[in-house]
Structure formats: structure tokens, C-alpha cells
């Protein structure tokens, strides 16, 4: 199973169309676990493009299709891993990172955080340590959340300003998984999100949180049927 849809944010009135023709509400009974993943990093590093590249499965597209997306707040991807049906809600900034105005609510409850830099722009790499990792420490409410460092735009190898070794060293320093990707060629994009999800599932505390929504739903249904049963017994 692999389907996707984009959703309106509670705070934004913008409504971008769904990418894979998905859409509509997704019933909690259609997945076992629900995880919040977010993308951070400097403007222009390719966060929105990586997200689009991940959302669009098995189809051809050109770089024009990856033009900057402003106003998308989050996208939902349903997928099955290890027999478990997962709902990934992936949050992308609507360009606020340009003004340094990402709020704590963006980070709240995240199970996975994707820290992105552009391998051709060194300042986007140094800003990860100087700005973004600090924001994560400050705002992330899940101490155990899984972080992944992504060096994007590896298709522009001749313009490289950050080596793979440097990326690996930074990932080690911040206890992150490390991937180099290209949203343009889609190299490593699926693997990177899949690996992140697998690591979330391996962490019991995150798995527990991810399943709470489902548990609540089941409890509600049970209460509903119990009450219905009691009413019909006593009347
Ligand atoms: N060559 C190349 N260009 C990319 C790649 N990913 C994104 N871009 C381009 O980089 C620019 C910024 O991308 P965008 O996704 O809007 O970055 P964001 O601000 O981090 O969301 C756009 O012009 C994209 O087409 C990539 O992997 N390779
Ligand atoms: Mg963007």
C-alpha cells in the first residue's frame, strides 16, 4: 500500500491539491501507527523538493515540477513497513525558515526530524550546527526522537562544497543517521525516509506514542458499543 494526500493546516487557509490524487480524511482504522516527521534547514536546500520527491512514487518528473513550494504545511503518506500500516505526517515549512520564525509548535511531538543542507552551499551546512540543531534541542519535546542529516543536491557533484566525510562527522556529533540525496534524481530519497521510519519503529517509546491515537480510537469505539449494549439491555 502506498498512498498520499496533502492536508490543510489548522492555521493556514492555503489548500494545495493532493499529489497522488489522494485526499479526503484518513480513518484511524486504516493505519496502525501515526508518526510526525518534520523537515528543517536553510531556505533553498531542497526540503520541499525532497518531500515531493518522496511523495511522488514511480513516476517521471522534471526539476520544474520541484519548483519551490510555499504554503504547503504538511503532507500525509501511508505506507506499510514490516507488516505495519503507517501514517506519516510530514511537515514542511511554508518558507518561515527564511525569517527565523519557525515556532515551537512546528517541533512539538515530532518523532523524526530531517535536517537538510545543500552539499553545494557550505553555509547551509554550518547553519545546521549553529542554528538548526540548537532549535531542535530547544523545542523538540521528544528527547528520543530520531534525527537524520541529509546532504541534498548530490547530482551537482562538480559544485560540491561539503565532503561526504564532513557530513558523516557532523551526523556522528549530533547522533543522526546520515544520507546524501538528490531530490532531482531521487537518489536515496525513498531510502532516507524509510530508514528514518524504521528507526522510529525500533524505539519503543516512539512506537508507543505513535500508537496512542489508534488506541484512543479503539477505546472510544468500545465505549460506544458498550453504551449501546447497556441501553438495549435496560430498555
Ligand atoms: N540540482 C538540484 N536542484 C535541487 C534539488 N533539490 C532542490 N533543488 C532546487 O533547489 C531550489 C530550492 O528547492 P526547495 O525545495 O524549494 O528548497 P526549500 O526552500 O528548502 O524547500 C529549487 O529551485 C529546486 O528545484 C536537487 O536535488 N538537485
Ligand atoms: Mg520549501
Image (spheres, helix red, strand yellow):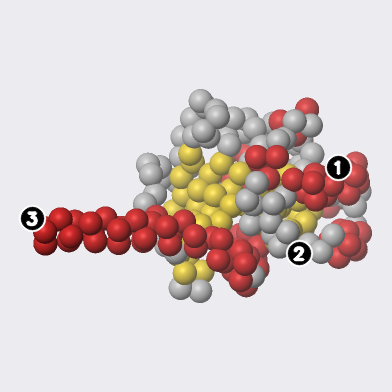
Neighbour class for label 2 at 10 Å: few (<14), some, many (≥20)?
A: some
Task: Let me know if residue 58 appears in the view.
Answer: no
Neighbour class for label 1 at 10 Å: few (<14), some, many (≥20)?
A: some
Question: Are discs 1 and 3 less than 8 Å apart at CB?
Answer: no
User: Is 32 in front, or is 74?
Assistant: 32
Mark 1 to mark 2 CA distance (whole Å): 19 Å
220 left or right, relative to 156: left
Task: Let me know if residue 208 appears in the view.
Answer: yes
Residue displayed at 23% across by 57% down:
227
- List the residue tagged with mark 2: 177
- List the residue tagged with mark 3: 235
Q: Position of residue 114 (x, y in %)?
A: 71, 52
First in sequence: mark 1 or mark 2? 1
Image position of 194 with respect to 24: above or below: below
- List the residue tagged with mark 1: 131
Q: Position of residue 102 (x, y in %)?
A: 72, 35
Image position of 40 with respect to 200: above or below: above
**Camera-side mark, 1 or 3:** 3
Q: Under tag 3, what secondary structure?
A: loop
First in sequence: mark 3 or mark 2? 2
Residue displayed at 88% across by 59% down:
170
Quarter of the figure with residue 44: top right
Neighbour class for label 3 at 10 Å: few (<14), some, many (≥20)?
A: few
Q: Is mark 3 within 8 Å of ligand 2?
A: no
Residue displayed at 42% across by 57% down:
216
Q: Under tag 1, what secondary structure?
A: helix
User: Is 24 in front, or is 142?
Assistant: 142
Q: Is mark 1 within 8 Å of ligand 1?
A: no
**Camera-side mark, 1 or 2:** 1
Q: Position of residue 26 (x, y in %)?
A: 39, 49
> Quadrant where the C terminus lies?
bottom left
Mark 3 to mark 2 CA distance (whole Å): 60 Å
Amino acid at each position: 500500500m502506498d498512498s498520499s494526500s496533502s492536508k490543510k493546516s489548522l492555521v493556514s487557509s492555503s489548500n494545495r491539491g493532493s499529489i497522488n490524487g489522494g485526499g479526503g480524511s484518513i480513518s484511524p482504522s486504516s493505519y496502525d501507527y501515526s508518526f510526525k516527521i518534520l523537515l528543517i534547514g536553510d531556505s533553498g536546500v531542497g526540503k520541499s523538493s525532497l518531500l515531493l520527491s518522496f511523495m511522488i512514487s514511480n513516476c517521471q518528473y522534471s526539476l520544474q515540477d520541484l519548483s519551490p513550494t510555499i504554503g504547503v504545511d504538511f503532507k500525509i503518506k501511508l505506507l506499510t513497513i514490516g507488516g505495519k500500516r503507517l501514517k506519516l505526517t510530514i511537515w514542511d515549512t511554508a518558507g518561515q525558515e527564511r525569517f527565523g520564525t519557525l515556532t515551537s509548535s512546528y517541533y512539538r511531538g515530532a518523532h523524526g526530524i530531517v535536517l537538510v543542507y545543500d552539499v553545494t552551499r557550505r553555509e547551509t551546512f554550518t547553519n545546521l550546527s549553529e542554528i538548526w540543531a540548537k532549535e531542535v534541542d530547544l523545542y523538540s519535546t521528544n528527547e528520543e526522537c530520531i534525527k537524520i542529516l541529509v546532504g541534498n543536491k548530490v547530482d551537482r557533484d562538480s559544485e560540491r562544497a561539503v565532503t561526504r566525510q564532513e557530513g558523516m562527522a557532523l551526523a556522528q556529533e549530533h547522533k543522526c543517521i546520515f544520507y546524501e540525496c538528490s531530490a532531482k534524481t531521487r537518489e536515496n530519497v525513498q531510502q532516507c525516509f524509510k530508514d528514518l521510519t524504521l528507526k522510529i519503529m525500533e524505539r519503543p517509546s516512539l512506537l508507543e506514542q505513535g500508537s496512542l491515537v489508534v488506541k484512543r480510537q479503539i477505546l472510544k469505539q468500545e465505549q460506544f458499543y458498550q453504551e449501546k449494549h447497556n441501553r438495549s439491555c435496560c430498555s
